[in-house]
Image: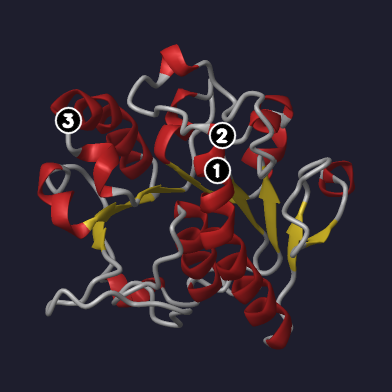
Amino acid sequence: MKPIWELYDLHKGAPGVLICNGPSLADVPNDFIKKYFSMGSNSVYVKDNILVDYYVIEGVGHLKKEEERLARMPYVKKVGNFGGATFVQRRLSHWFCHLPNVYPVDYRDYNNQVKHGWSFEPFDIYATGACVTYAMLQFMFAMGFDPVLIVGMDHKFDGGSWHFYPDSDAPEFESMPQDEYQRFRARVDPNFQIAANVYKSHSRTLLNLTPGSAAKMFETDKLENWL
C-alpha cells in the first residue's frame, strides 16, 4: 500500500472516468469504463461487472448501519486485491482498515474545522461540497487525471428515478422529497462551478459525457467519441 502522499500526480496526464450514480449510468457500456482508470462512489458496487480502480465512501450517514458497512466490504476488498484503492470517511474508516488499500479521508481537520472551497491537497483535507462527486473531482485533480470524463451525472431531480439502480438494490439510500432536491442543487451547483473553474484555469480537461445532463457548468462531449 502506497503512502497516501504518493497518490498525488500518480496518474498525471492519463484519462480517467468519474462515475456518478444517476439513471443514465445503466446505459454506459462496461467496456468504456474498463478502458480507462475509473473512480466511483457509494452504491456503484451494485452495477454488474464493474470494478472501479478507486472507490469512495464519503458520506458518514451511508456507513452508520452495520448492514450498510457489511454490504460494501466485499467490493472494497475486491478493489484492493486488484490493485485499486478505497477512500473512506475517516470517522468511520476503522470498520474498513483491515481490508487492502483503504485510505481514510475527511473534510474536517483534527480540530473538527470544516474545509470549504477547493483543496489542492484533498488527501490531507478535502473541501466539502454537499456531494461525494465534489470530493471525487478534487481527488482526480490531485491524482493528475487529464482529461476527466464524467458519466452518470444526470443531475435532474425532476421526479423520475434518482439512481441507475432500483431502490430495493441499495435500500440505505432513501430518495429525498422533491423540494429537498432544489435545496440540494442550491448547495451543490456553486461548488461544481468552482470545480469547472479550477480545471479550466489549470488547463485541465473536464468533460461531462452524460446525455441531457442538467449540470450545465461543465463542458460536454459525446461518450461515443471516447469509446
Label 3 vs label 2: CA separation?
Answer: 25 Å
- Earlier residue among tags 3 and 2: 3
Identify the residue at horizontal 13%, vertical 77% (top origin): 110
Q: What element does badge 2 sit on?
A: helix
How many marks overall? 3
Q: Nearer the viewer, residue 94 or 189?
A: 189
Q: Are marks 1 and 3 in contact (CB under 8 Å)?
A: no
Location of mark 3 (residue): 65
Name the residue: 70% across, 55% down. 149
- Tell me if label 1 and label 2 are in contact, CB under 8 Å: yes
The residue furthest bottom is 201
Q: Quadrant of residue 95?
A: top left
Residue type beneath disc 3: Lys
Mark 1 residue type: Tyr
Circle 3 packing at 10 Å, graded few (<14), some (14-19), many (20+), is: few
Q: Nearer the viewer's eye, disc 3 or disc 2?
A: 2
Which color scheme is applied? secondary structure
Q: Report whether 176 appears left or right of 194.
A: left
Q: Is 217 on the left or on the right of 130, as rendered? A: right
Residue 222 vs 201, above or below: the answer is above
Residue underneath mark 2: 178
Reading the image, the residue beneath label 1 is: 181
Give percent across and percent down for residue 1. 25, 59
